[in-house]
């Protein structure tokens, strides 16, 4: 690996750096709040990994309808629909297949357009879900910390364990 | 209607859960939740029936009618149908047992939240089984995990929130590792559909990325399974959670993670990759055996019965992994049937402990002394369940241990077989420790004034304990289904659907 190659992967280095930072904070800190913060950094690094992989530099364009082709596609779809009406025994699944086929054709049509840089939307969408999960986790963790502090009067893990040892 | 069973299995409890918050009335919520849990079980039975119909084999359900690799599919074969069957069965039985127990252990104003979290947890566990989409597994994993953290923190003891917090930290690290692995697999293959990933991995020439993805996902799931060195969250979480929650989570959550792990090894990756390119078989065998001995040893020294059973759970996971690590049809069947049997046995035993907790108000062995005189039925249930845990003939535990023994012998792994038998003796010690306290000790103050547990709790407990005897004698049913499941799993690893 040459230096340029290593530097060229800078986005992955950032991901790994953040991940290890977060992981270290989770492992090393005894303060419950800091643990949660570490956990957040750890999760964020994975979000970044997904988002960075979504970038496609030699892509052939997103499968989005252009004006001229769009009309074409619609006509085709309408025809397909008409055909289905004629065949009364066509099932719903085959309609699904037909639509998928059309979508494929449109994608190909768009692919003929000039190469361009585009972002794969799927990883970003996945990360929306993961971010929601992350928020739920953080909220639950904070709620638990509130309860722990009410019961023990401390959010330092070693102090809490000490209190428990005294009690038992 | 029948074709929509796969989605109903998830949709019914998922929609019911927030409804419970809106309703808020304690009695109404209780009745509705129990009804929902049993209807989910009925759906799971229906699905099992559909899968077993000759010539059927695999049910594919495309969500929103988007065809397979583009949309999310739910894919059910005899393996996940079997797991869903016992998860939903335990979910329904434990919830029927719940009302009396939580009346004492959870403040009344929070009951509806308990039922909500419980249904969400059930949804998550079933969702992990039913889906054929890898990212969906992560989402359902988090649904079940988040709700189980909340359920554990409902415990009365002030240590419950801390136990839930520690589980949350470790569980989230595990889930994030899993997510990272999914990301890498997506980067290699460009798809999230499990079958599609498997097809494309077979021709992908990216050994290092595949290896890293596999490692992350394995470690993530191992945390969730509580495999020996990663089990530290489990004893505290099981000990301080309310009895009902412990019964449910101990019976189902770790098994579903074992299921996800088996899917990862056999369906997404191939046994060849895992067991020949990587030394997964040897590694799993070592961790499983060390886990069995260390955790059983730790169980012997516990004074709290719940903690004792928690350590025993860590040990029992070892037996399931042993079965998987053999990677043969017999070994897999043994591992899968042990998932089923252990779910019944451990669920039943924790329900027994719940009865003691209700009437005696403590689960320390010292307080249980002599309880057999005042609570004969509950104590007898412990004896029967304990025999199952040890693996005495005519109990379910024997069936799985016998199959596991046969599978290890078939491979000529004598040392493993011998070690397994010795480890069963450790189970005798910790089960006997409690039996001795119950039957042959001077009654403690608390046990003297205890009453027999109410029928509402005893009947579900005996239902589960009775099932362990039933499936011990009538092993054709459970072992037959497990064998079908193992075949289905190995079939997916041979490439593509049958």
Image: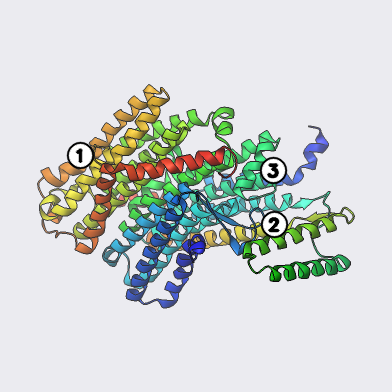
Image height of B136 relative to B295, above or below: below
User: Secondary structure beneath disc 2?
Assistant: helix
**Snapshot quadrant of residue B70:** bottom right
Q: Are marks 2 and 1 in contact (CB under 8 Å)?
A: no
Image height of B364 relative to A145, above or below: above
Q: Are marks 2 and 3 in contact (CB under 8 Å)?
A: no
Query: Going by the image, does B348 lie left or right of B339?
Result: left
Query: Which of the two residues, A10 or B30, is positioned nearer the viewer here?
Result: B30
- Measured as percent of width and height from the top left, residue B330 is found at 42, 34
Alpha carbon separation for disc pair 3 and 1: 52 Å
Seen at 78% across and 32% down, the residue is A1
Callout in the foreground (2, 1): 2
Alpha carbon separation for disc pair 2 and 1: 56 Å
User: Secondary structure beneath disc 3?
Assistant: helix
Residue identified by numbered label 1: B432
Local crowd at mark 1 within 10 Å, few (<14), some, or many (≥20)? some
Local crowd at mark 3 within 10 Å, few (<14), some, or many (≥20)? some
Image height of B124 relative to B103, above or below: above
Q: Is residue A153 visible?
A: no
User: Secondary structure beneath disc 1?
Assistant: helix
Residue identified by numbered label 2: A122
Chain letter for mark 1, please.
B
Disc with the residue nearer the chain's start (3 vs 1): 3
Residue identified by numbered label 3: B188
Quarter holding the C terminus of chain B is top right
Callout in the foreground (3, 1): 3
Seen at 32% across and 65% down, the residue is B106
């Amino acid at each position: 690996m040459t230096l340029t190659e290593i530097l060229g992967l800078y986005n992955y280095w950032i991901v790994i750096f953040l991940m290890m930072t977060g992981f270290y904070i989770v492992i090393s800190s005894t303060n419950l709040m800091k643990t949660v913060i570490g956990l957040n950094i750890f999760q964020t690094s994975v979000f970044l990994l997904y988002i960075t992989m979504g970038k496609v530099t030699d892509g052939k364009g997103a499968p989005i309808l252009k004006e001229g082709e769009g009309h074409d596609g619609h006509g085709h779809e309408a025809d397909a629909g008409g055909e289905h009406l004629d065949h009364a025994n066509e099932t719903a699944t085959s309609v699904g297949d037909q639509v998928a086929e059309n979508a494929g054709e449109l994608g190909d049509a768009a692919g003929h357009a000039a190469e361009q840089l585009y972002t794969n939307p799927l990883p970003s969408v996945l990360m929306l879900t993961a971010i929601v999960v992350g928020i739920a986790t953080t909220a639950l963790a904070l709620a638990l910390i509130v309860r722990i502090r009410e019961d023990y009067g401390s959010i330092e893990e070693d102090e809490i364990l000490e209190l428990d040892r005294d009690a038992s | 209607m029948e074709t929509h069973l796969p989605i109903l299995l998830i949709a019914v409890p998922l929609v019911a859960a927030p409804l419970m918050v809106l309703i808020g009335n304690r009695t109404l919520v209780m009745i509705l939740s129990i009804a929902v849990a049993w209807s989910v079980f009925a759906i799971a039975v229906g699905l099992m029936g559909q899968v077993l119909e000759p010539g059927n084999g695999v049910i594919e359900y495309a969500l929103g009618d988007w065809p397979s690799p583009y949309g999310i599919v739910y894919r059910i074969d005899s393996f996940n149908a079997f797991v869903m069957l016992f998860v939903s069965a335990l979910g329904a039985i434990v919830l029927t047992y719940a009302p009396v127990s939580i009346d004492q252990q959870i403040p009344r104003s929070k009951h509806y939240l308990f039922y909500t979290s419980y249904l969400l947890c059930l949804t998550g566990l079933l969702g992990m089984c039913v889906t054929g989409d890898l990212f969906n597994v992560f989402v359902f994993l988090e649904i079940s995990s988040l709700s189980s953290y909340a359920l554990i923190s409902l415990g009365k003891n002030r240590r419950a929130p801390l136990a839930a917090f520690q589980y949350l930290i470790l569980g989230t690290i595990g889930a994030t590792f899993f997510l990272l692995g999914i990301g890498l697999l997506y980067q290699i293959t460009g798809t999230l559909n499990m079958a599609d990933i498997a097809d494309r991995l077979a021709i992908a020439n990216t050994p290092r990325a595949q290896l890293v993805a596999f490692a992350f996902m394995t470690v993530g799931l191992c945390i969730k399974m509580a495999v020996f060195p990663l089990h530290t969250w489990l004893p505290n979480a099981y000990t301080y959670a309310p009895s009902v929650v412990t019964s449910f989570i101990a019976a189902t959550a770790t098994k579903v993670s074992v299921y996800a792990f088996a899917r990862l090894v056999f369906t997404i990756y191939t046994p060849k990759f895992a067991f020949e390119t990587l030394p997964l078989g040897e590694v799993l065998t070592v961790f499983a055996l060390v886990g069995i001995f260390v955790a059983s040893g730790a169980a012997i020294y516990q004074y709290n019965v719940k903690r004792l059973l928690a350590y025993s759970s860590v040990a029992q996971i070892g037996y399931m992994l042993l079965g998987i690590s053999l990677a043969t049809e017999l070994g897999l069947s043994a591992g899968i049937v042990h998932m089923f049997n252990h779910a019944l046995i451990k669920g039943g035993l924790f329900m027994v402990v719940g009865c003691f907790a209700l009437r005696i108000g403590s689960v320390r062995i010292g307080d249980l002394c002599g309880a057999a005189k005042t609570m004969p039925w509950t104590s007898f249930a412990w004896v029967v369940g304990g025999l199952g845990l040890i693996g005495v003939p005519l109990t379910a535990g024997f069936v799985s241990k016998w199959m596991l023994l046969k599978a290890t012998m078939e491979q000529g792994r004598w040392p493993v077989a011998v070690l397994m038998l010795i480890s069963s003796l450790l189970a005798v010690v910790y089960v006997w420790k409690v039996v001795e306290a119950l039957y042959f000790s001077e009654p403690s103050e608390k046990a003297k004034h205890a009453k027999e547990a109410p029928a509402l709790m005893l009947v579900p407990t005996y239902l589960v304990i009775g099932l362990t005897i039933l499936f011990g004698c009538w092993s054709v049913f459970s072992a037959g289904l497990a064998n079908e499941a193992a075949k289905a799993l190995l079939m997916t690893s041979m490439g593509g659907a049958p």
